Image: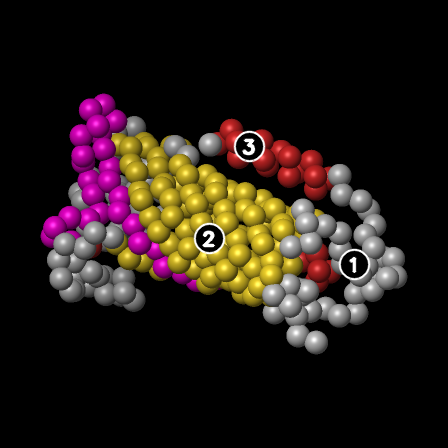
Amino acid sequence: MRYILLIVICALVGVTFAQPVRYRSPNGISDKKNYNRRAAQPYFLSFRCGLTQFYGELNAQAMHGIAGIGIGRSLNKQFAVQLDYNAGTIGGEKRAFFNSWFVNEYNSAECLVKWDLSEQFSQREPGPVHMAVYAGVGQIWFSANAFDLDGNRLLRFTNSQQSARNPLFLRWGPPKGPKGIKKTREGLLPLGTSVDYALLEKLKIALEYRFYFVRTDKLDATSGHRLINPEESDSYSETPNDAFSFIAVSLQYRFGQRKK
């Protein structure tokens, strides 16, 4: 999968540098910006797949996959809002002290605001390649397990029959609710950038990079420089929270008609 993604990335970069310098405006006047700044097709669906990377205690990399779907609406040609759902896995290892590798299966729901920099700052009508940045808020549901590097024996875990929910907005506190939860729930802050290329009038391909700040230190089934299980009742340590990212290729289909 990673080799297919690498080939697609190289092809997209090649297309980006091969774009024409000038692009005819739909208002019929070459090089001039279209006077109507509303999006021609304000609604869109997107599908993505890519590879994840982890930043935390067990940070020797083992890249895993991610797939997602999104739906959104362009407010105008500069700004859009979108709702994303992603599912994937995160992995990594560390031999020093921990002698562990981990795997984390997660799902996330995110609300994002996207800013098209090419539309915002170009003095002429932008060409088929657009650069954008985005940010938002979201929530992640995950279950992580850490195993011994030598014998693959389960060492630590985030969820078990004894796990219970922590208060959502308290850093420390006794667990609440019924025991036996299967997924830990935490907040996250996504930041990202993308390069979009218009293949057809309604179809775009994009190269995305998204980075997540997560409100937990146990994405790798490890919390701090210690070897105890980081279950709900003992979720936090004095070390920084974990983070992860993904790089992905996405397809976006646009539809709908702008208001007159």
The image quadrant that residue 121 belongs to is bottom right
168 lies left or right of 192: left
Decide whether the magenta segment is chiefly helix, strand or loop: strand
Q: Which-is-in-front pick, marks 1 and 2?
A: 2
Q: List the residue tagged with mark 2.
A: 69
Comparing 201 with 139, the one in front is: 201
x, y percent for residue 194 = 59, 50
In the picture as drawn, the residue positioned furthest to the right comes out as: 29
Residue stretch rendered in magenta on the structure: 136-163
Above or below for 100 versus 186: above
- The CA span between labels 2 and 3 is 21 Å
- The CA span between labels 1 and 2 is 29 Å
Q: Give the mark, 3 or 1, whose residue is nearer the N terminus.
A: 3
Amino acid beneath label 1: Glu
Q: List the residue tagged with mark 1.
A: 125
Instruction: Give the structural element (helix, strand or loop) at label 1.
Output: loop
244 lies left or right of 181: right
The image quadrant that residue 92 belongs to is top left
Above or below for 140 versus 248: below
Q: Residue at x 25, y 29 (%)?
A: 99
